[in-house]
C-alpha cells in the first residue's frame, strides 16, 4: 500500500534522506527507527504529502503522493511529530472541524467524532479547551484525528513520545487493534516499542536504510542471541562449558551466574542442559537470550556513523 | 456541494469561530467602533459641520484599517506556522488555495460585521437631515472593498513569517504605501528623478482615488476592478509563498 522508491530530500546542502526505498503491505506495523536526525520525520512527511521529495517517488495505494497529494491524503491518517493542535478549540470542536474537512456533515460527522472520542478514551475531556490538556490527552487528540475517515494507512510520528507507561500501553493496544486491516507506519526511537507492536522494522541512519527486517530477525543479529545464562551449583562449571564444541566463550558474572556464548549461528541450550545432567549440576535457573535490539541498533547505527566519517 | 467549496467553508468556519472563541473579536469590534465614532464626531466635527453627509465618517477608514486590519489578519498564517498546525491542515486533502480562500473570506466577513455595526452613524445623519442614501451605500461598498484589500495584504505578510509582530508591521507599512502612493509628498519625491510614467504608475497603485470615487457615490467599474485585482494579486502571492515556503 505504501511504496517509496529511491526517495531523496535535500535541505540546502544537507541531505536529510538519501535514497530510501521500501514497500509496505496491508496488515503490517512498520517501525521506522533510527537515531535523532536520521531522517525519520522527513521521510514520513514525504509519505504524508507535506514535503515534496527532491528526487524519487512515494506511491500510496498506487497514487503518486507528490503529483496528487489531495487524492493520496484521503487514505492517510497522519499524526505529526509535534502533535499540532488548534489550542483555542475544544477537543470535540477540533475533531468536528477535521471531520468536516474530511467530508462529513451533520449526523455522520457527529457519529464519527463520537467514535473517535471513544476509541481514544477522550470522552471525559471532550468539551475541554485543548490548551488546558495534559500531554497524554493532547497526544490522543491528535491520534483521534487520524481515525475520523477510517483510513487504510496510518502514519504516526512518535505516537507514544512523552506518555506515561499506562498511556503508552493504551496507545499500543489501539495501534495493534487497528493494524489488522491497515498499514501502520510509526517512527520511534523507543526500541521496546518496536518489540512490542511492530511486525517489521526499518532502521535508518544518516538518511539511509541500514536494516530492514522483522524485530525477531534483527535481534538474532545480536551477539547475545542464544547465549545461555545458567545459575547452578557444581564443580568447574565454567571450564566444562568452555570445552563444549558449540560454545565460543564463557563468562562468570559477579552474582555467580555463568553465561555461555554460542559460536556464530549455533544454538547451545540443549548442549548446556546435557552437560548439566551428565555432571549432575544442581540447576536453579537457565535462560536463553533471544538477543537484544538495543545492542543491534547501536551496532548498526554507529558503524554507519564511523563509515561516514571515514569517507569524509 | 463540491469538495473544494466544502473545504473552503470548513476552514472559514473554523477561522470565524476562532475570532469569537477568544477576546480578539470583542476587543477589536469595540475599539473599531470607538475609534470610528471618535474620528467622525470629534475630528471631523460632524455636528459642527452642519451637513448631513457621511464624508467625515468614510474618509478616515483607510487610516483606521491601516492599523486595525493587520491585527485581524496577522495570525491567519503566522499562527499556523508557529504552532505547526499547518502540517495538519495541509495533510488532510486541503489545498493551499482552498485554505487561504477560507481564511480570507472569514477575515473579510469579520470586517464586514464590524463595519455593519457602524449603522448608527448613517442613522444619526438620517435623523438630523436627509443624507444622500445612494452615496452612503456606495461609501459602504467602497469601505468593504477597502477592508478586503487590506485583509489580502495582511494575509500575504502573515504567510511570510511565523512571527505575528513582523507580519503586523509589514502589513502596516504596505498599507501606508498604498494610501500615500498617490499623495504629493510621495509623488514629488519620485518625480525628482523618476520618469513620468513611473510616477504615474506608482500613483495609480494608491487606494485613495478609487476609494474616494466610491465615497462620493460614483460606482465606476474600473474602481471595482482595481480593488478586485489588488485582492486577487495578494491572494495569489500568498499562495506562491505557501507553496514554496511551507515545511522547508
Image (tube, helix red, strand yellow):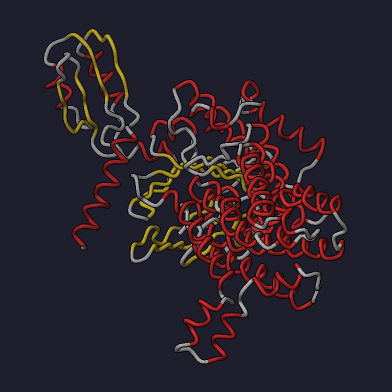
Picture residue at 12% right of the left edge, 22% below the top: A239
Q: Position of residue A214 (x, y in %)?
A: 44, 41
Query: Which of the 4 image quarters holds residue A111?
Result: top right
Query: Horizontal placement of B191 versus A297: left or right?
Result: right
Up the image or down, B241 lies above or below A246; here it is below
Query: Which of the 4 image quarters holds residue A16?
Result: bottom left
The answer to which of A235 and B27 lies nearer the viewer is B27
Q: Position of residue B63 (x, y in %)?
A: 60, 60
Picture residue at 44% right of the left edge, 49% below the top: A41
Query: Which of the 4 image quarters holds residue A162?
Result: top left
The answer to whether residue B8 shows anywhere in this view is no
Up the image or down, A221 lies above or below B135; here it is above
Picture residue at 45% right of the left edge, 53% below the top: A42
Q: Position of residue B11 (x, y in %)?
A: 68, 49
Up the image or down, A212 lies above or below B136; here it is above
The answer to which of B23 and A302 lies nearer the viewer is B23
The answer to whether residue A130 shows anywhere in this view is yes
Q: Position of residue B58 (x, y in %)?
A: 71, 60
Q: Quadrant of the N terminus of chain B?
A: bottom right
Query: Horizontal placement of A301 versus B247: left or right?
Result: left
Picture residue at 52% right of the left edge, 33% below the top: A139
Query: Horizontal placement of B54 versus A95: left or right?
Result: right
Q: Quadrant of the C terminus of chain B?
A: bottom left
> How many tags in the picture?
0
The answer to which of A116 and A209 lies nearer the viewer is A116
The answer to which of B124 and A19 lies nearer the viewer is B124
Amino acid at each position: 500500500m505504501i511504496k517509496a522508491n529511491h526517495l531523496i530530500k535535500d535541505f540546502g546542502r544537507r541531505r536529510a534522506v538519501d535514497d530510501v526505498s521500501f514497500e509496505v503491505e496491508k496488515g503490517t506495523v512498520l517501525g521506522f527507527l533510527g537515531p535523532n536526525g536520521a531522517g525519520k520525520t522527513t521521510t514520513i512527511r514525504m509519505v504524508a504529502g507535506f514535503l515534496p521529495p527532491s528526487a524519487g517517488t512515494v506511491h500510496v495505494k498506487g497514487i503518486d503522493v507528490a503529483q496528487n497529494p489531495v487524492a493520496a491524503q484521503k487514505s492517510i491518517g497522519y499524526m505529526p511529530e509535534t502533535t499540532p493542535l488548534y489550542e483555542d478549540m475544544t477537543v470535540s470542536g477540533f475533531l468536528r472541524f477535521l471531520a468536516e474537512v474530511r467530508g462529513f456533515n451533520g449526523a455522520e460527522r457527529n457519529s464519527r467524532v463520537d467514535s473517535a472520542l471513544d476509541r481514544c478514551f477522550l470522552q471525559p475531556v471532550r468539551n475541554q479547551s485543548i490548551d488546558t490538556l495534559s500531554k497524554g490527552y493532547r497526544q490522543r487528540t491528535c491520534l483521534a484525528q487520524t481515525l475520523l475517515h477510517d483510513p487504510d494507512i496510518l502514519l504516526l510520528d512518535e505516537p507514544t513520545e512523552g506518555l506515561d507507561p499506562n498511556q503508552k500501553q493504551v496507545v499500543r493496544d489501539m495501534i495493534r487493534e487497528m493494524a489488522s486491516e491497515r498499514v501502520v507506519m510509526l517512527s520511534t526511537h523507543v526500541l521496546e516499542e518496536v518489540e512490542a507492536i511492530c511486525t517489521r522494522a526499518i532502521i535508518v541512519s544518516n538518511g539511509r536504510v541500514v536494516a530492514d527486517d522483522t524485530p525477531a530477525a534483527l535481534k538474532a543479529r545480536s551477539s547475545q542471541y542464544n547465549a545461555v545464562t545458567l545459575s547452578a551449583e557444581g564443580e568447574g562449571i565454567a571450564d566444562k562449558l568452555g570445552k563444549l564444541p558449540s560454545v565460543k566463550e564463557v563468562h562468570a558474572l559477579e552474582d555467580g551466574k555463568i553465561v555461555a556464548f554460542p559460536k556464530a549461528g549455533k544454538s547451545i541450550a540443549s548442549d548446556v542442559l546435557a552437560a548439566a545432567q551428565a555432571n549432575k549440576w544442581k540447576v536453579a535457573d537457565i535462560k536463553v537470550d533471544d538477543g537484544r535490539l538495543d545492542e543491534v541498533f547501536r551496532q548498526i547505527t554507529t558503524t554507519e556513523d564511523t563509515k561516514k566519517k571515514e569517507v569524509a | 456541494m463540491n469538495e473544494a467549496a466544502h473545504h473552503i467553508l470548513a476552514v472559514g468556519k473554523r477561522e470565524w469561530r476562532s475570532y469569537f472563541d477568544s477576546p480578539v473579536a470583542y476587543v477589536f469590534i469595540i475599539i473599531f467602533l470607538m475609534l470610528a465614532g471618535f474620528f467622525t464626531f470629534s475630528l471631523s466635527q460632524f455636528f459642527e459641520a452642519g451637513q448631513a453627509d457621511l464624508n467625515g465618517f468614510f474618509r478616515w477608514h483607510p487610516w483606521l484599517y491601516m492599523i486595525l486590519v493587520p491585527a485581524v489578519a496577522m495570525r491567519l498564517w503566522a499562527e499556523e506556522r508557529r504552532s505547526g498546525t499547518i502540517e495538519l491542515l495541509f495533510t488532510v486533502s486541503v489545498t493551499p488555495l482552498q485554505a487561504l480562500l477560507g481564511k480570507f473570506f472569514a477575515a473579510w466577513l469579520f470586517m464586514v460585521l464590524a463595519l455593519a455595526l457602524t449603522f448608527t452613524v448613517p442613522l444619526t445623519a438620517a435623523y438630523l437631515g436627509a443624507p444622500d442614501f445612494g452615496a452612503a451605500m456606495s461609501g459602504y461598498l467602497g469601505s468593504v472593498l477597502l477592508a478586503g484589500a487590506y485583509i489580502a495584504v495582511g494575509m500575504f505578510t502573515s504567510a511570510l513569517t511565523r512571527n505575528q509582530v513582523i507580519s503586523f508591521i509589514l502589513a502596516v507599512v504596505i498599507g501606508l504605501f498604498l494610501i500615500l502612493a498617490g499623495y504629493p509628498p510621495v509623488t514629488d519625491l519620485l518625480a525628482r528623478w523618476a520618469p513620468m510614467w513611473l510616477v504615474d504608475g506608482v500613483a495609480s497603485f494608491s487606494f485613495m482615488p478609487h476609494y474616494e470615487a466610491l465615497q462620493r457615490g460614483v460606482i465606476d467599474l474600473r474602481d471595482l476592478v482595481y480593488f478586485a485585482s489588488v485582492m486577487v494579486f495578494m491572494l495569489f502571492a500568498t499562495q506562491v509563498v505557501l507553496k514554496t515556503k511551507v515545511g522547508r
